Image (cartoon, grey):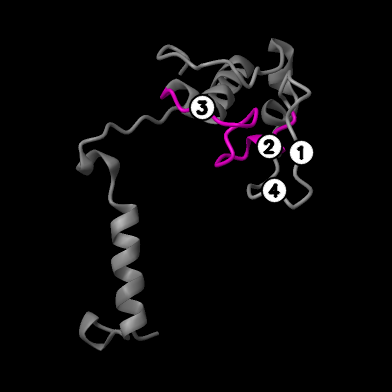
Amino acid sequence: MRFRSRRQETPSGQILRSFLLKISLPLAERGKPIHARAMRTTLDVKRTLQYVLNNALRHGIAFDGVVDPYSSGAWFNGWCDDRVVRPTREPPVALARTWQLTSGWFIHGRISPSAVPGPGVL
């Protein structure tokens, strides 16, 4: 297989390369810390779900509905509030496949859509 050099790259390939470089630039190079760690317990999983789904509340952003319309929270089945409106279209994210994500974390109770995650959640 022969690879093209950058000079021979098509204009659409150049645009794609530029786009990918911009979005894949590590956050550390932008001055933001990178935080990654394994979720080892069911409580870690619950806290991570709460942090991700309710993060807008932590930053003081309020919504007309119960959950953040820009998140996948409407498809989430672990809310303790029955007011969450379930969309009829397909979810924009893959379904959970591990026991910890599908049901394991439920032993710690459901998540409130109004619970503001604190700095010590993760």
Crowd tier of the residue under label 4, counting other residues whose Cα lies within 10 Å: few below 14, some 14–19, many 20 or above = few
- The disc, 1 or 4, on the residue closer to the chain's N-terminal end is 1
Residue 74 numbered tag? 2
Residue 62 numbered tag? 3
Instruction: Place residue 43 in its image quadrant.
Output: top right
Crowd tier of the residue under label 2, counting other residues whose Cα lies within 10 Å: few below 14, some 14–19, many 20 or above = some
Please tell me which residue is depicted at 63% across the width and 18% down the height of the picture: 42
Picture layout, residue 94 above or below residue 53:
below
Picture layout, residue 19 above or below residue 48:
below
User: In the image, residue 30 lies at what x, y percent?
Assistant: 22, 42
Q: Nearer the viewer, residue 101 or 15?
A: 15
Give the spatial CA distance, label 2 vs label 4: 9 Å
Tell me which secondary structure the magenta stretch mostly adopts: loop
Type of amino acid under label 4: Pro
Disc 1 and disc 2 in contact, CB within 8 angstroms = yes
User: In the image, residue 52 lies at what x, y percent?
Assistant: 52, 30
Picture layout, residue 71 above or below residue 113:
below
Give the spatial CA distance, label 3 vs label 1: 19 Å
- Quadrant of the image containing the N terminus: bottom left
The magenta stretch is 59-77
* Mark 1, residue position: 86
Circle 1 SS class: loop
